[in-house]
Amino acid sequence: MKIKAILSIAVMMCSFTAISQATKGKISYDVYMSSDDAAVAAYVDQMEGSTLELTFMDGKVRSDMFVGQMMTTTSISHKGQDTTLVLLDGMMGKIAMKVTDNDMDEEQRLAYENREIELVDETKEIMGYKCKKAILTAGDANESIVWYTEEIMPKYREGQYLYDEIPGTPLEMHSKWGKMDMKIVAYEFKEKLKKTDEIFSTEVPEGFTVKTTEEMKKFR
């Protein structure tokens, strides 16, 4: 009888965990950038007020980075498809790219293949969610700190902000891009999504010009 009672409790706990996990929704983040380098700091000032939106459901992921008043970068990918739609809307106009893994240069490929993720036994609370710490080391030896929650669990975790090796969703990230430090902190999560066909469409929107990654490299 005791064994049956223990098993029943275990099943109930597992069921509760599965039910309580959110597998779709949109997370909104504030993005903070800074630099000790005077030349970079002047550029960073133009990025004030940057935000990030991460939207996901059913094997589909979309990220929208709003870089101050300068540019919006959108990335849409579907599980099982090798092509990611990237949209740039800013000073260079409206540009669309269809990017595959083959478009990565050697430095990017090595950084991706050699990345290491360490799950650390540290916790803190963000937006009321219990978060755990992960340390990501890329090919350039720079470390990124990720605070993730297991209470929000996209079924498909790939791309710049979601990692299959991290069992949850980042609510806070600290990273370094060259001489610039970046901190991303979540401030809102909405589980209900509307117009999902439009949100996750990989068709090039009207008004965007399609360019190859080789063409875009000329603009650096």
Image: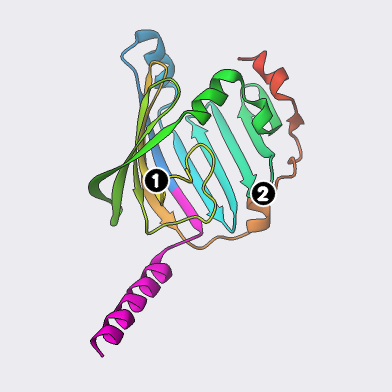
Mark carried by residue 170: 1
- 1 and 2 marks in contact (CB < 8 Å): no
The numbered mark at residue 218 is none
User: Is residue 182 in view from this perspective?
Assistant: no
> Residue at the spot x=45%, y=31% of the render?
115
Give residue 206's position: percent from left, percent from top: 76, 40
Which secondary structure type mostly characterizes the magenta part of the structure? helix
Residue stretch in magenta:
1-27
The residue depicted at 33 percent of the width and 73 percent of the height is: 13
In this view of the protein, can residue 197 be seen by the observer? Answer: yes
Lower position in the chain sequence, tag 1 or tag 2: 2
User: Against 48, is 61 above or below?
Assistant: below
Q: Which residue is mark 2?
A: 80
Tell me residue 187's x, y (percent): 36, 48
Say which amino acid is labelled 2: Gly
Does the segment drawn in magenta span residue 165?
Answer: no
Q: Judging from the image, what secondary structure is the residue with disc 1 in?
A: strand
